[in-house]
Image: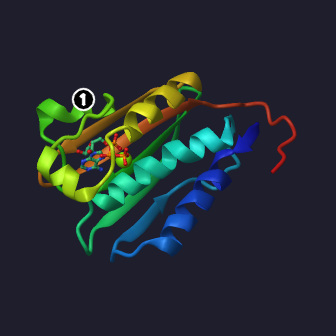
């Protein structure tokens, strides 16, 4: 489907903002759009759900989660950042491996299988994009992904 990614992203963020149980502030740095992308909406929803639920899971009360979209080199670059505990530098690349969890004891207490980001990587790659993370222990984590930008606005439907 050809989708306005701006509208699509806001809708997912809205859903988390209504449901969240923690005192976490959401900050959106998102251009007005529309920015068209060709995506599988169900799969992309799953990807973004996982990234946002990770950000919330590892955010302290009173923390911020920032959402941004930048248009760069005919791609959309999407980022979700948190002020959470971060990930040790040696492990940042490994979080996209299946069943990988940065801190076994801590992660087990938090729940989850360690599959979310491995699936996200598969799906983003299938969409012609890439996904990576930057993190600083004790400061926070940013997960980035890119998607090809559909310049032609072939009739949007949603
Ligand atoms: P699942 O998504 O299957 O419920 P999960 O969240 O543990 O389980 P992933 O989403 O694949 O699995 O994340 C892998 C690991 O990467 C996590 O267990 C956690 O250790 C680390 N991680 C991911 N996102 C963050 C984040 N925003 N802050 C800190 N650590 C993170
Ligand atoms: Mg997860």
The reply to whether the residue tagged 1 has its Cβ within 8 angstroms of ligand 1 is: no
57 or 61, which lies in front? 57
Image position of 34 (left or right of 82) = right
User: Percent position (x, y) of residue 105?
Assistant: 12, 50
Secondary structure of residue under mark 1: helix
State the residue at coordinates (26%, 75%).
62
Q: Quadrant of residue 149?
A: top right
User: Percent position (x, y) of residue 156?
Assistant: 83, 44
Q: Quadrant of residue 126?
A: top right
User: Percent position (x, y) of residue 55?
Assistant: 34, 55
71 up-or-down from 15: above or below: above
Categorize mark 1 by other alpha carbons within 10 Å: few (<14), some (14-19), many (20+).
Answer: some
State the residue at coordinates (27%, 62%).
59
Location of mark 1 (residue): 94
Number of labels in the image equals 1
Image position of 117 (left or right of 44) = left
149 or 47, which lies in front? 47
145 up-or-down from 22: above or below: above
User: Percent position (x, y) of residue 34?
Assistant: 71, 48
Give the residue furthest to the right.
Answer: 155
State the residue at coordinates (48%, 26%).
122
Q: Quadrant of the N terminus?
A: top right
Please say whether residue 37 is visible from this viewpoint: yes
33 or 137, which lies in front? 137
Image position of 60 (left or right of 151) = left
Please say whether residue 128 is visible from this viewpoint: no
State the residue at coordinates (13%, 35%).
89
């Amino acid at each position: 489907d050809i989708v306005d990614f701006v509208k699509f992203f806001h809708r997912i963020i809205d859903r988390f903002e209504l449901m969240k149980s923690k005192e976490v502030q959401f900050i959106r740095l998102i251009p007005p759009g529309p920015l068209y992308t060709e995506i599988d909406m169900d799969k992309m929803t799953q990807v973004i759900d996982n990234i946002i639920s990770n950000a919330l899971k590892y955010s302290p009360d009173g923390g911020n989660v920032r959402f941004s979209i930048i248009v760069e080199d005919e791609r959309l670059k999407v980022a979700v950042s948190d002020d959470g505990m971060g990930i040790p530098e040696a492990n940042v690349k490994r979080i996209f491996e299946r069943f990988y969890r940065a801190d076994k004891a801590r992660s087990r207490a938090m729940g989850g299988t360690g599959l979310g980001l491995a699936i996200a990587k598969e799906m983003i790659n299938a969409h012609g994009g890439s996904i990576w993370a930057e993190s600083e222990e004790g400061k926070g984590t940013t997960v980035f992904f890119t998607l090809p930008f559909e310049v032609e606005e072939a009739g949007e439907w949603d």
